Amino acid sequence: MKFNESTGYQIITDWLSKNKRTPFDFQLKTWEKYGSGYSGMVVAPTGFGKTFSVFIAVVIDYLNEPENYGNGLKLLWITPLRALAKDLAKAMNQAIEEIGLDWVVEVRSGDTPIEIRARQKKIMPDILLITPESLHLFLAQKQHKNLFKNLNCVAIDEWHELVDSKRGVMTELAISRLRAYKPELKIWGITATIGNLDEALDVLIPYPIKKIKIIAKEKKKIKILSVLPDEIEVLPWAGHLGAKLVEQVASIILKSQTTLVFTNTRSQSEIWYQLLLNQYPDFAGQIAIHHSSIDKDLRIWIEDNLNSGYLKAVVCTSSLDLGVDFKPVDTVIQIGSSKGVARFLQRAGRSGHSPFETSTIYFVPTHSLELIEVSALKAALKANAIESREPLFLTYDVLVQYLITLALGEGFKANTTYEEIKSTYTFKEITREDWDWILHFITNGGNLSQYKEFHKVVIEDGLYKVTSRRIGMLHRLNVGAIVSDVMMKVKFLSGGYIGMIEEYFISKLNIGDRFVLAGRVLELAMVKDLTAFVRASKGKGLVAAYLGGRLPLSSNLSHYLREKLADSLNAKSSEKELVFLHPLLQRQSEHSYIPQTDEFLVELIDTREGHHLFMYPFEGRLIHEVMSALIAYRISKIRSITFTMAMNDYGFELLSDQPIPINEDNVHQILSKENLIDDILHSINATEMAKRKFRDIAVISGMVVQTYPGQRKTFKSLQSSSGLIFQVLEDYDPNNLLLKQAYTEVFNQQLQESRLRAAFNRISASKIVIKHAKSFTPLSFPIKVDSLRQSLSSEDLETKVMKLQNEAFKSDNKR
């Protein structure tokens, strides 16, 4: 029988017809391939029904061949976000009810009530939506194998968000175990477009089974609108311009049905929530703030009221980035640079979520130069230049945690589990020698064998098991691959939970100081254990600058940014952003230079403060942090000299009280691609960086326990414990795989070695242009201001900025 003549297909097409819906070609193909025994990956734009392509495929298959499906769990749906799981479960339940099935759909996450979790340990629903962490907690249960014995399909939603992370590795490992229970298990991934789709498919399904990549032909229409200030700022600086545009942002919200206002950091979301309320007090009760540090119940209330259309706007972070379908949302506003093409697309897709609707996104610059990024984004989208997501290799900390999870559950046998592990993409290169080391580590602690707390697993009749109740309890409390900075609960003295805030921020406050959280001004009353008790307050409060808050500029966006800057003074340009920026770009050209794509600009500026060297790789803040240290080291080899450093996404500054010995004769040597890694190792403290990276590895692998019943270790305690272990391993066990992993992660993730090499290869092939400027230029000025932020309050900073701008304009008049 042909697929389109099958019972299941007819039932589903009748159901869709009643709802006046027609399946897309990619959905039809997914349904047919699933029925033919394929696994695969579906790639489609936001709002076109990626979820229903796989979910309905399972339903059709069941309707066609119910004898192949047993009682209990049939479809396991892995999702990276709890909010997304809840939204999907609601949509699936509605569809199942309308189709006439008696299936049960449930969610399993940290937010699931205890009584439902207890029931799921015995009786599984037909469809379970789950996070990677909660799935591993299932694997840590005794006799969990019975819960998955009738599982037909595992679907991984938003795979692009997992593929390059340790949570993705957790997903890979869990799938390998589920396949061991049921080799015919089908695996389907659902993803937005990324630059390395074939590799993403191989990571998800590295097994020798029938698999296919299904890409939707449909394209999402996106309308990008820049919010322009009344006048151009020729010496721009980051942050303040956005606040000046709050009236325009409020106007956009008022004329829209429902708006998501995306910011890049939690602190920025708190600031913008207050700005909007101050600008338009009638927003009180109509707008809300949503980020990961806000109380769970409040977040759920916000999500529910977004769905109902009750809320006019929500100021949010990446907490609402992914796949959540809030139908009333017709407008998205992005505050500041999105730093990447894929992230911008993801956020734009939150508006006009239905097929063929146009997603409208407004871009609000936080300083004038960011308008060039809008132009770059448009060019990147036109060229479909979406970033790749690079998978991880040999993450031994996740593997150690996983093996203890298996040992805690039903136990595992060394040889068969080794073959399972080696079948995954991440661990395909693992050697027998490394495997034996890991087994020795989880049973005896390796070279830490004198410490009994590292003897976690015992071997009984060839089966690796955890027999200690204490080890089992602590392991379950600490399952996961997200190691956040230690958070403190924030509660009212009178009772009532508000949210979480990072320990380091509270440690800087005195009793009576005011700060902002969840859109409220709070006064610190007392700190007890890891809880900050507060009173409600009024006036201004400090906004927490959360650690790790600044996103890196992607290589794709930086490429188009260089192109757009090079072409920025083109008289024929029809892009309104570049036309608007013409006075700023003209000033850069007159006072210094605008580099072409095959050129590299170096600026030298002398002021009363000292001697400034500016370079503009346009490679993002993280790369510039490494490059600035490297260039400082190479200059110091010419002459002993001390620098202070500052950087932004466009370039970096070296400041010295001595003249900087850089000129046409030595600049190529200073910017050489030769001896790159050796010079980087001399210019940075790689050991200290590895020690900090080791903290996360120690927590994930269980060498350091972060969470105990009712309490969590402080940041200082974690750093101290992991630092002590790091030093012992450095001295006595330098070949420890977890120690080696720390250095590997420093080079691959923190130093981004491959991107650094590519940047220096490009610079080496470019013409180096050295310019001596009389005063700060439009490109150098925002870097200069960033260097002042560390030592000045916001009021003092604004005064200092105005003074620097006035000095620059006076210098113009003297020329």
Image (cartoon, grey):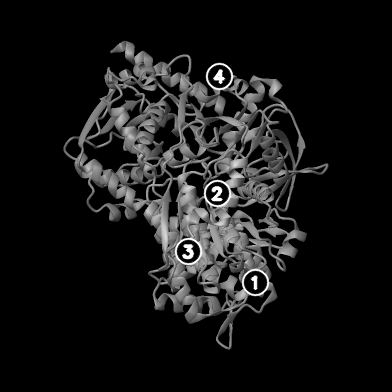
First of labels 1, 2 by sequence position: 2
Secondary structure beneath label 3: loop
Tag 1 residue: 144
Q: Earlier in the sequence, mark 3 or mark 4?
A: 3
The Cα–Cα distance between marks 2 and 3, rounded to whole angstroms, is 19 Å
Mark 4 or mark 2, which has the lower sequence index?
Answer: 2
Mark 3 and mark 4 residues within 8 Å of each other at the beta carbon: no
Count the marks: 4
Local crowd at mark 3 within 10 Å, few (<14), some, or many (≥20)?
A: some
Q: Are marks 4 and 1 in contact (CB under 8 Å)?
A: no
Could you say which is closer to the camera, residue 21 or residue 767?
Answer: 21
- Whichever of labels 4 and 1 marks the residue nearer the N terminus, that label is 1
The residue type indicated by label 4 comes to Gln
Circle 2 residue: 51
Q: Are marks 4 and 2 in contact (CB under 8 Å)?
A: no
Camera-side residue: 82 or 211? 211
Considering every residue shown, the one lying at the far bottom of the view is 461
Q: Is residue 186 left or right of residue 276?
A: left
Can you tell which of label 1 and label 2 is closer to the viewer? 2
Q: Nearer the viewer, mark 4 or mark 1?
A: 1
